[in-house]
Image (cartoon, helix red, strand yellow):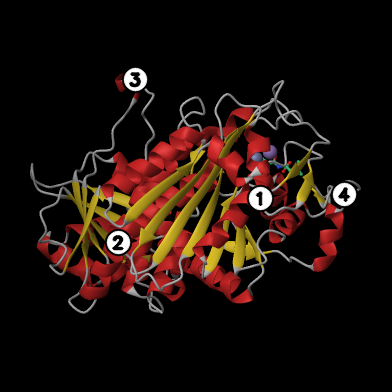
Amino acid sequence: MRFSVTTSPIDKPKANLRAVAVFHKRKLGTQGEVLDAVLEERISGVLKAGEMDGGVGNTLLIPSVAKGSPGTLLIGLGPRKDFSVKSVRKASAALARILVERPAETVAVALDDMLPPDQRIGWLVHTLVSAIGDAGYRFTAYKGKEEVKPVRLKTVVLCVTEEQAPEAERACAEAEAILAGSDHTRDLANAPPNVMYPEALAEAARELAAKHRKLKATVLDEKELRKLGAGAILAVGQGSERPPRLIALEYSGAGKEDAPIVLVGKGITFDTGGISLKPGEAMDEMKYDMCGAATVLGVIKAVSELKLPLNVVGVITSAENMPDGRACRPGDIVTTLSGQTVEILNTDAEGRLVLCDALTWVERFKPKAVIDIATLTGACIVALGHHASAVLGNDEALIDALKKAGITSHDRTWELPLWEEYQEQLKSNFADMANIGGRPAGTITAACFLARFAEKYSWAHLDIAGIAWKSGKEKGATGRPVPLLMQYLLDQAST
Ligand code: BES
Ligand code: MN
Ligand code: ZN
């Protein structure tokens, strides 16, 4: 799917379908009036007949008069007095759903009528492109041709005013790159776990690096991890036939003296729980336990395509958590890369183990900030459900920047406290710490564990267990939090 921006009025671009907004009580906007005049008042005629009242998210398709001439799609935006980001978001989702179901290959959308008074055109472009991209995503790699109904939509032309054009064009390029990034994240995450294992993630990183001049991939295999002393990653991976990997993708978009932002993704390509085996129900969804890693790859792809003037390092810490004769046991004590020892009381708390060695390893990049991204705790879903990721960390400014980027991108994150008091729950009788902290505040104690390995730099942790994928009928990866992290990086690039 391609998106482009034009300043020509809605009736001018070559399109199979033109979409215009209708407000409550059948009122048209400026572009709607233009199109109505061109169509000899067909739109106002249909509205007068009471076929559509302009309620938020209501839509009406007016077929073309003559063969070959474009059809018209009306999108309801509700009453003018309630015209807001909320109504536009709802209308965009409804519009997107229809556009990807229609046979139209090219559609033109009148954007200037859809812009709420308190918003910028860039915001609207981002909102619309991500809604259409989201609705148009399909994962069909393993489906027979008969069953797949392809999306016909290829080109979306966004009509804006002269004045809006420069900002709209910039936003369009950003939004397309973010979409490409989150689609990549979704493809990697949806891939089955027999295909997507640690070395496959390493290969995905090498492939990305081969496509962009400013990217460099480094992969540490299990021998190198042993030499390094990454005892925690190795412990998690030792029960699997597929050995662990530690992967770095270095993007250099700024000078050498510019300290990089480091993103660390949890890449458990399948989480059975290990010897502390998970219950069988919905265990297939634990293929999504590498969504943090997939997010890192999606973000690095988008950053490279946009050529952002920043240095960014994407790190993936990957293993498969399996029960086996060689697997680690509850009670095992391992020495982490930091030298601190951990008593593994539950082999299902493996995410923090692969992450802790990676957090020590990234000290070598002398980072400006480190953000880890992980499907870390079921407790996070209990706390926040499926709407927000949890954010915790040791730097209030970094956390605030992430919260702000989450609001802008509507890929929101909510802070949980990382108070000293919670650290007590990680006490072990036999090692420096245990890898679990009991039932209370599971998301916080997981972050407390990570905090002990992230003391040397500014750090934030995103628990994405509730937002990275959907279950049930709509089962599939969401591509979140690529939009959140991209907005954060765009904000960083512009300050
Ligand atoms: N990958 C899981 C977390 C998870 C579970 C994410 C369900 C999404 C849905 C993680 O490795 C895990 O198993 N965490 C345990 C930690 C516990 C043993 C302290 C959990 O949340 O139950
Ligand atoms: Mn687990
Ligand atoms: Zn896990």
First of labels 3, 4 by sequence position: 3
Which residue was labeled with disc 4? 428
Where does the image place residue 91, in percent across and percent down from the top left? 39, 58
Judging from the image, what secondary structure is the residue with disc 1 in?
Answer: loop
Q: CA distance from mark 3 to mark 4?
A: 52 Å
Residue 165 visible in the current orientation: yes
Q: Residue furthest front?
A: 227
Image quarter for residue 274? top right
- Residues tagged 3 and 1 counted as in contact (Cβ below 8 A): no
Which amino acid is tagged 3? Gly
Judging by the rendered image, the residue that carries numbered circle 3 is: 144
- Identify residue for label 2: 306
How packed mark 1 is, by other alpha carbons closer than 10 Å (few <14, some 14-19, many 20 or more), is: many
* Residue type at numbered disc 4: Ser
The C terminus, quarter of image: bottom left
Q: Position of residue 438 (x, y in %)?
A: 84, 48
Q: Is residue 140 left or right of residue 404?
A: left
Residue 188 sits above or below residue 491 on the image = above
Find ligand 1 in the image and state its quadrant.
top right
Residue at left 45%, top 38%? Answer: 201
* Marking on residue 337: 1
Marks 2 and 1, Cα distance to the nearest angstrom?
Answer: 35 Å
- Foreground: disc 4 or disc 1: 1
Q: Callout 4: few (<14), some (14-19), or many (20+) C-alpha neighbours within 10 Å?
A: some
Question: Mark 3–mark 4 contact, CB under 8 Å?
Answer: no
Mark 1 or mark 2, which is nearer the start of the sequence?
2
Look at discs 3 and 1 and give the one toward the viewer.
1
Q: CA distance from mark 3 to mark 2?
A: 35 Å
Amino acid beneath label 2: Leu
